[in-house]
Amino acid sequence: MFAPKDKPQVIVPVRLDESSPISFQCSKDLSCFTKCCKEAHIILTPCDIIRLKKRLKLSSDEFLFVYTALGTIENTELPVPVLKMREDEVKSCPFLVKEGCGIYEDRPLTCRYYPIASGVFHNLDESQDEKFFALVKEPHCMGHDLGEELTVGQWLESQGINEFEEVNKGWTELILRRKSLGPFVTIQEKTKQMFFTGCYNVDSFRRFVFESKFLDIYVIPEERLQKAKEDDYAMLDLAIDWLRFTFFGDPVIELREQFAEGEMIEAEP
Ligand code: SF4
Ligand code: SF4
């Protein structure tokens, strides 16, 4: 995810788990400092967007418009925002400053994972989904085999990844369920648009909830609604439940009586 689009990542073909040892240390003193922040392919997760829009004091619409291009999540047809690199000679990240990452505390998940790649084996019994890892070794990166040995789990913890994964859990599950349908099931444009708005454009989804027929159709408990009005993470949570209900029929949102009895539902963002 972090490598330039046209240059393949060098993934070491050894399967790792959270207890596997690695040695890696990134430092300003290395000659490669910030090389990884140029010509990078960084997909943005729902949690990344909420943190960055807050940090930059932008609405999610503004953030997506200014900083992202549209990409696709591999093998799913599902849309995902990708961070737009600057149009300078080296295609540097828009957040790169002389001292390094200018948004370090809110850097995206992809940047936090590096140099670890992760994947999931999706079993039919979802309780048994299995996460696995691998090491990414790119020729320009000098941080390998430096510093103290630590486990993959310790690395992930040191990068604050668990907090992001928790926020992104519903999004990740939607992607895995889409993947499990296989490549021959195509997705309509309308479905892609709903997924995009629900997962990435929290302010647009908020308008959809409060300014469309949404509340005439769905019963949302008052306390949940109030929380979602003020809190982006709560609004994302509501959006994910709405997507689960709409795409898969999961009973996580309640329809008002007349709609439960089959009346047409027309609201969409
Ligand atoms: S060690 Fe690797 S991750 Fe750190 S600055 Fe150098 S290239 Fe980037
Ligand atoms: S967000 Fe920060 S760490 Fe990530 S590529 Fe940009 S400057 Fe580098």
Image (spheres, helix red, strand yellow):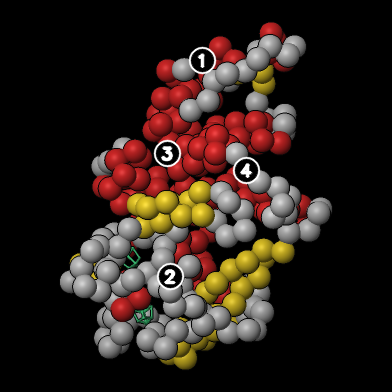
The secondary element bearing badge 1 is classed as loop
- The residue nearer to you, when weighing 220 against 250, is 250
Question: Which residue is labeled 1 in the image?
Answer: 213
Query: Which sits earlier in the primary sequence, circle 2 or circle 4?
Result: 2
Type of amino acid at the residue the image marks with label 4 = Ile
Q: Are marks 1 and 2 in contact (CB under 8 Å)?
A: no
Query: Which sits earlier in the primary sequence, circle 4 or circle 1?
Result: 4
The Cα atoms of the two marked residues, 2 and 4, are separated by 24 Å
Question: Which residue is labeled 2 in the image?
Answer: 5
Question: Which residue is labeled 3 in the image?
Answer: 201
Residue 263 horizontal side relative to residue 198, left or right: right
The Cα atoms of the two marked residues, 3 and 4, are separated by 20 Å
Query: Which sits earlier in the primary sequence, circle 2 or circle 3?
Result: 2
The Cα atoms of the two marked residues, 2 and 3, are separated by 25 Å
Percent position (x, y) of residue 219?
61, 17
Q: Is residue 172 above or below residue 215?
A: below
